[in-house]
Image (cartoon, grey):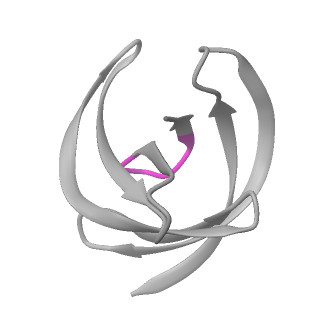
Amino acid sequence: MTQHILTVMVTDTNNRSRGIMPVPMEFDVGGPTRLQHNGQTYRFTGKTGHHFTPYVMVREMATIDDARLWITLDGIQIWED
């Protein structure tokens, strides 16, 4: 796995932009597998899907405390859940 720090657009649960943030993350061949966001570590849950605006492939990530987010496969956009 490779680790990168990407500049990511973050959207909250109310569909409001939280702005652009640097997010350290690790990737496998399919997309992000682990990332640090808001002081927590998120890991890929194994669940994938589509986000509808824009229509893109995403992965679900979760913390040990079950906080969740969705992230694009290229890691440049996060939707908090």
Q: Position of residue 3 (x, y in %)?
A: 55, 81
- Residue appearing at x 66%, y 68% in the figure: 40
- Residue appearing at x 49%, y 65% in the figure: 63
- Residue appearing at x 42%, y 59% in the figure: 62
Q: Position of residue 48 (x, y in %)?
A: 20, 46
Is residue 71 shown in magenta? no
Q: Is residue 63 left or right of residue 37?
A: left
Q: Please tell me in which quadrant of the rendered image residue 41 appears.
A: bottom right
How many marks on residues?
A: 0
Is residue 76 shown in magenta? yes
Q: Nearer the viewer, residue 41 or 1?
A: 41
Q: Is residue 20 above or below residue 53?
A: below
Q: Is residue 39 left or right of residue 28?
A: right
Overall secondary structure of the magenta section: loop
Please state the extent of the stretch shown in magenta in the rendering: 72-77
The quadrant in which the N terminus is found is: bottom left
Q: Is residue 23 above or below residue 53?
A: below
Q: Position of residue 24 (x, y in %)?
A: 66, 70
